[in-house]
Amino acid sequence: MSLRSPLGRVLGLGSAKDGTEHWWAQRVTAVALLFLGGWFGYALVRIDSLTYLDVIRFIGQPLNAILLSLLCVTLAYHSYLGVQVVIEDYVHTPGTKIVALLFSRFAHVLVAIGAVYSVLAIGLGR
Amino acid sequence: MSLGLVVLAAWLMQAAAGPEAYLLFTIGMSTFVGKLLLVGWSFAFFFHLANGVRHLVWDTGRGFDKRHADLSAWFVLIFALTMTGTFWWAAL
């Protein structure tokens, strides 16, 4: 016999009360990165050279700029979700855990904004 | 992987900062350590990608028996090595 209440069963959240959204977000970003990451790898092979002018010309193409921005934001989100799990699983001191999670969140947002701003700055010709 | 993201962002930011800043980045990445890191990240990328697909398949409830789990583990490793080789061969 189950001791779970009907409401608890319907909500299906388990004892932690969250995690479903995290699980989904990790998989949705994973599928998105399959395409975006694949495109980026292909683009790196196709680009003439990685000299300044060629790179600026590459990022200056609207489609490349859009895909690069999507790639960076999705990467940062996926990376944040992964690092979060590592911290939650392996950092056991409550204070350190919160500081680490906070630092990770700030760092990931900083990296995402920095990358997207740079792509826009190049794409819009500053 | 997360540190690779930082380098990807640094690459874009240095490009946005101008030719001199970008040259600095290129010089850093052409050192032996820089090249080693780039090859390492490309391998980690392909390994992570293949293993991620492996996990997505597992999420559907398939491939859990020992034979298929072993098989997919070898596939991931061979895929990562082959793709790393192919990537650098095609890029250079």
Image (cartoon, rainbow, N blue to C red):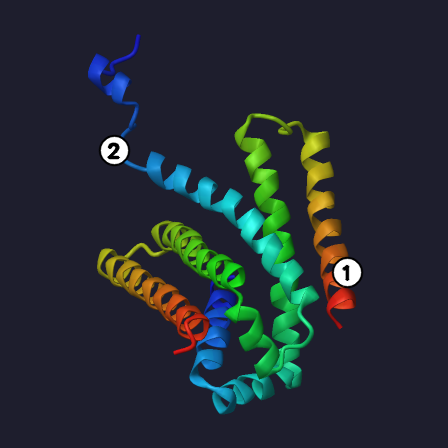
- Is residue A27 or residue A72 the one in the foreground? A72
- Is residue A110 or residue A45 the one in the foreground? A45
Q: Give the residue drawn at x 69%, y 65%.
A: A46
Q: Residue B86 — which label?
A: 1
Where does residue A23 sit, x and y in percent of width and height?
Answer: 40, 38
Crowd band around label 2 with a 10 angstrom C-alpha radius: few (<14), some (14–19), many (20+): few
Q: Is residue B65 left or right of residue A20?
A: right
Q: Give the residue drawn at x 66%, y 69%.
A: A47
Q: Give the residue drawn at x 64%, y 53%.
A: B47
Where does residue A70 sit, x and y in percent of width and height?
Answer: 45, 56
- Is residue A21 or residue A117 the one in the foreground? A117
Residue type at the position of mark 2: Lys
| Location of mark 2 (residue) | A17
- Give the answer, above or below, for where B72 lies relative to A85: above
Q: Quadrant of the C terminus of chain B?
A: bottom right
- Give the answer, above or below, for where A90 lies relative to B35: above
Mark 1 and mark 2: span between their CA atoms?
A: 45 Å
Where does residue A115 sit, x and y in percent of width and height?
Answer: 42, 68
Letter of the chain that mark 2 sits on in the rendering: A
Residue type at the position of mark 1: Thr
